[in-house]
Image (cartoon, rainbow, N blue to C red):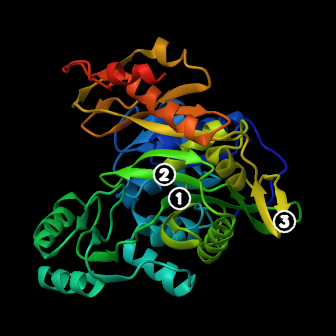
Amino acid sequence: MISIRDEIGTPLTDSAVKILLLGSGELGKEIAIEAQRLGVEVIAVDRYPNAPAMQVAHKSYVGNMRDKDFLWSIVEREKPDAIIPEIEAINLDALFEFEKEGYFVVPNAKATWIAMHRERTRETLAKEAKVPTSRYAYAETLDELYEACEKIGYPCHTKAIMSSSGKGSYFVKGPEDIPKAWEVAKKKARGSADKIIVEEHIDFDIEITELAVRHFDENGKIVTTFPAPVGHYQIDGDYHSSWQPAEISEKAEREVYRIAKRITDVLGGLGIFGVEMFVKGDKVWANEVSPRPHDTGMVTMASHPTGFSEFGLHVRAVLGLPIPAIEENGTRKLPVLTPAATHVILANQEGYAPRFRNVFKTLSIPNATIRLFGKPEAYKGRRLGVALAWDKDVQEAKRKAEMVAHMTELRTKSGEWQDQEYEKRKHLL
């Protein structure tokens, strides 16, 4: 475990402080940028070359992160100060071995192991953290899936036991949907689908992410600081838009912080956690937890001061650096600089080397910008960028972010320019 840090060396020298990113997507890219701003050496790893974080890292490696020997070869060569998993497709046994040998895995190997498996996550939330969740059941056969859905009641949600971003999930309206739910879990999961979890459908007002960050205070004690809750909505199980602050009651907000602290205290370690929850009125249910920056938290690149986005907070916490906060009724809070929102820029075609246009128009919109991730390959539904917007009013920020995202057109080498509905929506500007 890293302790309080009071000095940082120089990258690519013997004095360097090093972080190793296992996964180099758009979230890893922002972690790398924030680390570089503090003079930290960054090594990025992914399954394909020129991944987003590799484009801004000092060094990079390409290989199968499920291969324990591949991971060990990098760790033994680089001897990083911190190993930061950024995706699910990692050899978990290797993480425990790294920790046993004295390496710092962020936030820790156990938390990563728990969060990458829906059954372990749900049992941790409900039975260890003892926080409210939707009702749930498990199934290993098609017959058991029928029984589990009947037990939980319709409508309900079925999810592969190991997956993310909505892959392997299905909304079951009635018994007639169960064969399709079974097929989707088995064919589209990103990990294991040996078991399926069935979850009660919560008729929530809003889905939120609490970006709780565990870090050292000035006395060397681990404390938790809470940015304001982030509201978001999904399409096909994947994040589509987010905004901060979320529109919830003061009572619900206090409950969000309470639940997030109970969960992250059980998981332990240092760094930022994305705790997903459902909110209806003043009631709050925990849903999932991610032991790293969350895609919905990209909004903090606009809502927070430079260096205090979720990525900056993660880097500070991982390195043992301070996070100044205000104390309010016994809760450490990080104020929002300005209401802000995001909206994804998605591909609707497959191909290599995507190009983007209308960039001059999008960057002419006041209080808005785009982040293009630099992914070398597009496929339908892949997130290639995000629009950011900020305003005095969160609703206006949401409207503006959606408009900017839809103005951004793209094409691949083999495709046509895709219609992002700019002509339909430009009158709203």
Q: Residue at x 64, y 33 (%)?
A: 391
Q: Earlier in the sequence, mark 3 or mark 1?
A: 1
Residues under numbered marks 1 and 2 in contact, where contact means CB atoms less than 8 Å apart:
yes
Tell me the SS state at disc 3: loop
The image position of residue 56, as x and y in percent, is 54, 31
Mark number displayed over residue 108 = none
Up/down of 403 relative to 205, above or below? above
Which amino acid does the dot numbered 2 rest on? Answer: His
The image position of residue 111, as x and y in percent, is 53, 70
Give the number of the mark in front: 2 or 3: 2
CA separation, marks 2 and 3? 34 Å
Residues under numbered marks 3 and 1 in contact, where contact means CB atoms less than 8 Å apart:
no
Q: Earlier in the sequence, mark 2 or mark 3?
A: 3
Q: Residue at x 45, y 82 (%)?
A: 123
Q: Residue at x 28, y 23 (%)?
A: 419
Task: Left or right? Give the position of 312 relative to 378.
Answer: right
Check the image and name the residue furthest to the right: 219
The image position of residue 307, as x and y in percent, is 71, 39
Closer-to-camera residue (68/338): 338
Q: Earlier in the sequence, mark 1 or mark 2?
A: 1
Closer-to-camera residue (248/212): 248
Q: Which residue is mark 2?
A: 232
Mark number displayed over residue 208 = 1
The reply to whether residue 41 is visible in this rendering is no
The image position of residue 50, as x and y in percent, is 40, 31
Closer-to-camera residue (396/190): 396
Task: Left or right? Give the position of 192 relative to 217.
Answer: left
Q: Which residue is mark 3?
A: 220
Give the number of the mark in front: 3 or 1: 1
Residues under numbered marks 2 and 3 in contact, where contact means CB atoms less than 8 Å apart:
no
| Quadrant of res 12 | top right
Tell me the SS state at disc 1: strand
